[in-house]
Image (cartoon, helix red, strand yellow):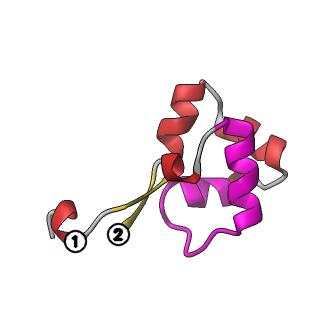
Amino acid sequence: MPVIVNLDVVLAQRKMKLNTLAEKIGITPQNLSVLKAGRAKAIRFSTLELICEVLECQPGDILEYQTNEEQGN
């Protein structure tokens, strides 16, 4: 998949647990885990906005686009 989710990196930089973020943005830890693992097919802008607000980051800090060549395919 060409869109890479770097949520785990940002969480580590902020020294925040997934469960803490889930509680602060009002989403289940299971759903947030799906996003973190890169298995989500979509994300609502409102959810992305809350994540960025709590983590004090930009959407580009969490989501990254890579071409197939960059992925080594």
Percent x, y of residue 62: 52, 50
Name the residue: 70% across, 69% down: 44
Expressed as whole percent of the image width and height from the top left, the position of residue 31 reads 68, 60
Q: Nearer the viewer, residue 41 or 62?
A: 62
User: Residue at the location (82% across, 41% down)?
Assistant: 24
What residue is disc 2 on? 2
Q: Which residue is mark 1?
A: 68
Characterize the magenta stretch by its predominant secondary structure: helix
Residue depicted at x 48% and y 61%: 38
Say which label, 1 or 2, has the lower sequence index.
Answer: 2
In the drawing, what numbered circle is on residue 57? none
Magenta range is 30-56
| Marks 1 and 2 in Cβ contact (< 8 Å) | yes
Dot 2, crowdedness within 10 Å: few (<14), some or many (≥20)? few
- Left or right of residue 33, residue 50 in this image: right
What is the tally of numbered marks visible in this picture?
A: 2
The disc labelled 2 sits on which kind of residue? Pro
**Secondary structure at numbered mark 1:** helix
- The image position of residue 61, as x and y in percent, is 50, 46
Q: Residue 57: x, y in percent? A: 61, 40
**Label 1 packing within 10 angstroms: few (<14), some (14-19), many (20+):** few
